[in-house]
Amino acid sequence: MSDITKKSLTEIVRLVKKKEIKSEELTQSFIKNINNDKKLNSFITKCSEIALNNAKNFDENPKLDKLLPGIPIAVKDLFCTQGVTTTAGSKMLENFIPNYESTITKNLWNEGAFLLGKLNCDEYAMGSSNETSFFGNVMNPIAENTVPGGSSGGSASALAADLTPATIGTDTGGSIRQPASFTGTVGLKPTYGLCSRWGIVAFASSLDQAGPMTKTVEDCALMLEAMVGFDKKDSTSINRKKESYSKNLTENIKGLKIGIPKEYRVEGMSKEIDKLWKNGEKILKDSGVEILDISLPSTKYALPAYYIVAPAEASSNLARYDGVKYGFRSSKGNNLIEMYENTRSEGFGDEVKRRILIGTYVLSSGYYDAYYLKAQKVRQLIKNDFDQSFKKVDAILTPSTPSSAFKIGEKKNDPISMYLNDIFTVPVNLAGIPAISIPAGLDNNNYPLGLQLIGKPLDEQKLLNIAYAVEKKINFKQTLNRWWEK
Amino acid sequence: MTKENGKYLIEGDKGKWEVVIGLEVHAQVTSNSKLFSGSSTKFGAEPNTQVSLIDSAFPGMLPVINEFCIHQAIKTGLGLNAKINLSSVFDRKNYFYADLPQGYQISQYKNPIVGEGEITLDLPQGSKKIGIERLHLEQDAGKSIHDLDPSNTFVDLNRSGVALMEIVSKPDLRSPDEVNAYVKKLRSIMRYLGTCDGNMQEGSLRADVNVSVRKVGDRNLGTRCEIKNVNSIKFMQMAIAYEAKRQVELLESGKKVDQETRLFDTKKNETRSMRSKEDAHDYRYFPDPDLLPLNLDKNLIDKIKKGLPELPDQKKERFITEHKLTPYEANILVSEKEISDYFEEVVKKSDKKLAKNWIMGDLFASLNDKNISITDSPVTSSKMAQLIDCISSGVISGRTAKEVFEVMKESGEDPKKIIESKGLQQKSDPKELETIIDKIIFDNKDKVSQYKSGKEKLFGFFVGQVMKISGGKANPKLVNDILKQKLK
């Protein structure tokens, strides 16, 4: 059999169901790839032994009617996994072992999958290049010393390098879609509330949403189907019937209307991105879709609003990491206040501290109205923009990112330029709507570029269908020389 | 301090001062589980045995509102004649403390579940309405224990996340006595509703007391101080008396009252500064993004309203008309639900007037002596009813009943058994009494003629003789009747 690890998840599931491959053999193949990786640094914790035991157990008593039978899956290290260290990419949780399993991972395991490892990410998911992780930066398989994007950088890197057949990430402002775009993979941020947040280390609660990261759109549909479901343990979880995204996937999108928002044509956008976008438009037209120019006038306020709301929530969400109950505690300090100060000074990295400071500031008495409250109003305007547009169109097409992957260190000391990376992805989180990034072409360096499709709330199926149709026509191929194995 | 027409005023060197008091009462919601988790709320468990992952704020844990606590808050709001807000919001109140695992308390800031209401106090000088500003739900914190080890602080999270109702009064209270009446009334209403057990020893009811003073006749409010976390009515009263005097002295000596938070030292009977306004925390309130706004269905509120039990004020009115009580008596009998239940049980089976006198007299005295509550009384309501029945049916006299009660209050024995075993039954056989009376008339012919010639006072002498001979057991009414007839 040709290298199983290069195949799509859907194909692997098909082979397992046809009993053409055993889970153990499959798992061994991925473990081999993981062990051969000397440079990507995409794993924080490898779970080879656990995975092999699970694979053997599966092979002894294979339950083939599941969505993910006998499939090993590595997950972003933001998902709490019972008995397995969960770090959130932070020194603060370096040795934290939860005794509980996040709802999303539990859903995957209930569908027959098991844990292959925990993937590197920006510290507490704060970052766009995976350079803020306490466990070191991650490299993009497309080229050495290139960032994989962030914060789900380890997930994107491991997926693109065939170290896991599929993975899951979290997306607060683009943390799934931007790394997917940077690595030539597919990433979906579902409607807020579709995937339970229970057991995911929180960054910004009103924006955080888990989603699948896969090699193909079909895989994405399959993974999403395995992840979703109402969870009464999450008060923001949406109570609705589960959909069969993979079964209902179709490339017939004839007659749909898709909008092109003029505000996304930002100043200084490269010709390559423009070309990519035009090409996407053309492909959609060829598929029988009507293209409409639309306007999302509040777009320019999205990024500043995001960088108020997200840090505000983060500053409060991260207050629990105080050294009292679990996680890192500094040995220095003579009283409670000093213990807090030292623990948090030593335990958090610079980017996390920066956002806690911003968040604390914008919530402070006297500044609340000018910042937080105003940002919430902007958020409503952005949501209204989308609502208006979706009266006319079924989905919106934009580039996923304003550029392709950049070099490690290139933007590290320029937070504003780093934050600008999220310019196309952030409005979606503020509005709580779904969006998918799919690989759509290569730039002059042969680095992948992604297109983003934005949909109505809970309209994931349509979004997947459109992405499926575009994927087929684009026929994106990237060849990786596996430099990280040398 | 002087009391002028029942008013509590502080006599300063430069005039009379009025005290203005507002209370923030923290009442623990009666509920088996916590506000946002399924952990037990039972009092007195081993430290850290009633703590879920949510209460201890583990990564990725999310709060889920306990619907029962919402119903309890609505009930309480209705009991306070308050507006129930159909939409309210849970906010995060951010601050660091070792016994606050999340680093924030989930509370309600701008949009509480219950808005304005009022309760009526019955005071010696008449009734007075006290405004309620709001009621909101919030989580309790854990407990820091500083005295178990010289260099370490221990944290017990059993209380962490327990539901509290914070009930904020308007600054309508004017004296320690009014505060006493207010807290007791509030407690009584919540106990009737079953929404808070009001147990102050266990910390189920505590209050922050806001105190300011102003010259009599002044309309503007003075600068207030907040005395934090006072856990008994007595301490509240002491703290207010001290604090009001302190403020008057400051103002009269030309100084200013600083707006600050103070603590009441129960040992020294004084308040002292805890933190000034400048040092006040910036709690950085914002809506908790883990919880959606709480939207209530009007039907739910109507349903809860229909199911409300009779409250103290309503019961008082009913007692006055139904049981012919004075407002004063009714007030006492409805103050505690258990007392009113006891009273109603007794009057169901026996004479109303006797019932009220016995309960408010001998029974209360015995409960006071023993310092026990009515539910722990050895004299149960049915035994009390039996005793009263024995009096009204003439089995024993009121005086003998006191003797029987003395035994009952110790042993809890059945009154009829006591009467029987001690042979305390009244002599109610007319023939037997006639024989006694005939003999007395025969032996005291001179007194009989004096009586008949108009010295009616001597009637008591004859009654006394009958009682003497009968050993006090003669039925007084019968004795009267027979004597009157024979002496005609």
Image (tube, coloured by chain):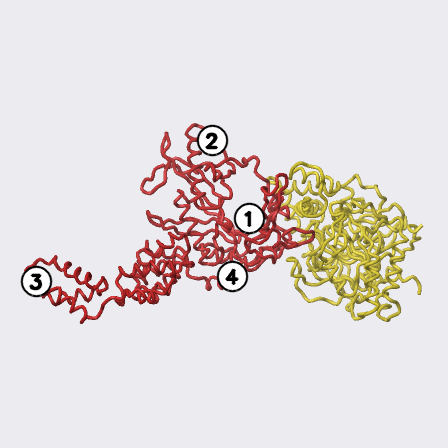
Q: Are marks 2 and 4 on the same chain?
A: yes
Q: Nearer the viewer, residue A155 or B25?
A: B25
Element type at mark 1:
loop
> Can residue A313 be seen in this snapshot?
no
Tag nearer the camera, 2 or 3: 3
State which tag comes first along the sequence, 2 or 1.
1
**Distance between the alpha carbons at the discs numbered 4 and 3:** 84 Å
- Reading the image, the residue beneath label 1 is B110
Circles 2 and 3 in contact, beta carbons < 8 Å: no
Q: Are marks 2 and 3 on the same chain?
A: yes
Q: Callout 4, which amino acid?
A: Lys
Q: Mark 4: few, some, or many residues within 10 Å (few <14, many ≥20)? A: few
**Distance between the alpha carbons at the discs numbered 2 and 4:** 48 Å
Q: Callout 2, which amino acid?
A: Lys
Q: Callout 1, which amino acid?
A: Lys
- Reading the image, the residue beneath label 2 is B256
Element type at mark 4:
helix
Residue drawn at (55%, 56%) of the image: B42
Circles 1 and 4 in contact, beta carbons < 8 Å: no
**Distance between the alpha carbons at the discs numbered 2 and 1:** 31 Å
Q: Are marks 3 and 1 on the same chain?
A: yes
Element type at mark 3:
helix
- Reading the image, the residue beneath label 4 is B298
Chain identity of mark 4: B
Q: Colour of chain A?
A: yellow
- Reading the image, the residue beneath label 3 is B445
State which tag comes first along the sequence, 3 or 1.
1
**Distance between the alpha carbons at the discs numbered 2 and 3:** 87 Å
Chain identity of mark 3: B
Q: Position of residue B125 (x, y in %)?
A: 32, 47
Q: Position of residue B357 (x, y in %)?
A: 30, 58
Q: Callout 3, which amino acid?
A: Lys
